[in-house]
Amino acid sequence: MALIVQKYGGTSVGSVERIHAVAEKVKSWHDRGHQVVVVVSAMSGETNRLIGLAKEVNPDPSPREMDVLLSTGEQVTIALLAMALHRLGVDARSYTGGQVHIRTDSAHSKARIMDIDGTRVRADLDAGRVVVVAGFQGVDESGAITTLGRGGSDTTAVAMAAALKADECQIYTDVDGVYTTDPRVEPKARRLDRITFEEMLEMASSGSKVLQIRSVEFAGKYNVPLRVLSSFEEGEGTLITLEEEENVEQAKISGIAFSRDEAKLTIRGVPDHPGVAYQILGPIGEANIEVDMIVQNIGKDGTTDFTFTVHRNELNRALEILRKTADELGAREVEADDKIVKIALVGVGMRSHAGIASTMFKALADERINIQMISTSEIKVSVIVEEKYLELAVRTLHEAFHLDQAA
Ligand code: ASP
Ligand code: MG
């Protein structure tokens, strides 16, 4: 008998029929003698609908009231799922985040979970009940409702699993696992049986949208075995764990992530002296704009060129700030480019195998794809290329690292 936390996303509970199907699935685990906690998202489209309503009433809604509103989507699905379970003869109880003491900080719309008191849930489980918990929400110290950021139900599930020391946290979604890359770009993409937390984190931060990044961080920190699997088909899905696969003889590359949400800014001819990096990026950071990749190059004439990337949505804001900085520093020019994408090759095999980056660069060069920026970590190499090469670059790398073949 195991304690399992299952999370069903918006599409999986998107209609009455689908809620019945989820109830059947939960019942089958419960019937086999497992203790089951279910975390659900709002019905698909509901959170967006609520955001739309709020904007109609007030274009600049208060973050506190926004969270009161958005948390209602999940309150609907927990009650409906509990009712569906009752109809199948399963004893079940639903709870909002606050009712099971999911305590968060007060950062409305992106709150972090600080603590969960599992006493109530455990008592229900011990009494043979299925517990259904609303994803995406908690309460802060003052009792205000908070939400955890879009896709936050994943994090609720992982946090519940950590608090209850569950044997596994299963994320049921509309794909049947984590793939080597997005199958819409490369049809030969393959489902991975396993991937490490570290790799999954790099994939998620480089654009893979299967899991909310925070949920992966949380799972890694508390070592919660996490499985991504389909709500609609049977299958083993992808297991995300601490251990690397036994077979680390080959240079193991797990996948290719990419992001179209990038934009690049360059400031040229900045008089070079200690502190310029700070002078350029300081004001960007103060405006709460996240900088991803950075390249600095020193010219012969004692000036420096400085390039960095930001989220495409923040390009205009960043550009405005950078133009001001350029004036102050006496820089020659400022340039912006949003026709770029980031492509990242991810794999723990990079640690023990040299030459992976050069294989990557050669494969891109053979297709005459120009690399504009490069950054590396222990288990990742990311490049910035022109947007029009995205598909070609992803397929080329998938082929070059034989990702269509099981390791
Ligand atoms: N309902 C929330 C959203 O749409 C949370 C979630 O689905 O995980 O982002
Ligand atoms: Mg999701």
Image (cartoon, rainbow, N blue to C red):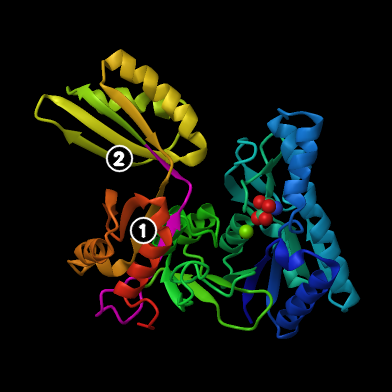
Among all residues in the image, which is located at the extreme left? 300
Q: Which residue is mark 1?
A: 344
Q: Quadrant of the C terminus?
A: bottom left
- Report the residue at 66% width, 81% height from top: 233
Q: Which residues are magenta?
A: 244-264
Q: Pointer 2 and pointer 1: residues touching (CB < 8 Å)?
A: no
- Name the image quarter holding residue 351: bottom left
- Report the residue at 26% width, 74% height from top: 251
- Report the residue at 70% width, 80% height from top: 29
Among all residues in the image, which is located at the extreme right? 87
Question: Residue 202 at x, y = what percent?
Answer: 40, 58
- Report the residue at 69% width, 75% height from top: 35
Q: Amino acid at mark 1?
A: Ala
- In the rendered view, does 78 fall on the left or right side of 208? right
- Specify whether residue 143 is in view: no
Q: Amino acid at mark 2?
A: Ile
Q: Secondary structure at mark 1?
A: strand
Residue 311 among magenta residues: no
Which of the numbered marks, if any, corresponds to residue 47?
A: none
The Cα atoms of the two marked residues, 2 and 1, are separated by 15 Å
Q: Quadrant of the N terminus?
A: bottom right
Q: Nearer the viewer, residue 134 or 30?
A: 134
Q: Which residue is mark 2?
A: 294
Q: Nearer the viewer, residue 164 or 286?
A: 286
- Name the image quarter holding residue 94: bottom right
